[in-house]
Amino acid sequence: MSNEVILWGTLILPWLSLLLMPKAEVKRYLPAGLLSTIFCIIVIETGIRYSWWAIHETTFPFSVIPTYAYGFFPVLPMWLLKFTYKHFVLYFSLDVIFNIVFAFVILPWFDHRGIVRFSAGLTVFIFEVIISLILYGFQMWMEGIYVHSES
């Protein structure tokens, strides 16, 4: 399988999975997913600036940011919040597991395939855990907005 197919898959497949989520829940969790993307792009740009990693292969028209930043990073938090929101310990535990897999399995595999040069698994893991805490707090804040706007 070519790197191009893998990268396009990391963009398209997560978004297609949202067809399985009820429309109301997509609307409910989409702001947190988009915030996750913004944080992810900031982390990627920071990592490039400080040479923690280098992006070697992307897909057109994405020139610097890999496509998983636009696929996995907005959609995975939406699914995680859908199944674990209001159960913080479960949310945080699953998110830590996903972050470990991403930072210490998926990114090194991408490095091995030549998609990225990667040497900062612990740094990515720490950033992603911080982002997950922010996202949960953001979703709690958003839920407060929804409650007030409905009444």
Image: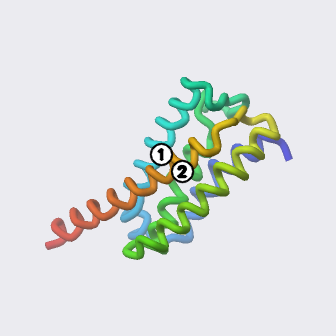
Q: Is residue 49 above or below residue 14?
A: above
Q: Quadrant of residue 143?
A: bottom left
Task: Pinpoint residue 58: horizontal percent, then vertical percent.
Answer: 68, 33
- Left or right of 106? Residue 19 is left
Q: Residue at x 79, y 34 (%)?
A: 114
> Which of the numbered marks, if any, corresponds to residue 37?
1
Q: Is residue 37 above or below residue 24?
A: above
The three-letter amino acid code for the residue at tag 1 is: Thr
Residues marked 1 and 2 touching at CB (< 8 Å): yes
**Which sits in the foreground, 13 or 127?**
127
**Residue found farthest to the front:** 122
Q: Residue at x 48, y 45 (%)?
A: 37
Task: Pinpoint residue 96: horizontal percent, then vertical percent.
Answer: 55, 61
Q: How is the image coloured?
A: rainbow
- Left or right of 35? Residue 107 is right
Q: Badge 1 local density, few (<14 within 10 Å), some, or many (20+)? A: many
**Which sits in the foreground, 33 or 94?**
94
Label 1 and label 2: CA atoms lie apart by: 6 Å
Task: Pinpoint residue 133: horizontal percent, then vertical percent.
Answer: 41, 57
> Which of the numbered marks, if any, corresponds to residue 75?
none
**Residue found farthest to the right:** 1
> Which of the numbered marks, if any, corresponds to residue 73?
2
Q: Element at badge 2?
A: helix
Task: Pinpoint residue 95: horizontal percent, then vertical percent.
Answer: 53, 62
Disc with the residue nearer the chain's start (1 vs 2) = 1
The three-letter amino acid code for the residue at tag 2 is: Phe
**Residue found farthest to the left:** 151
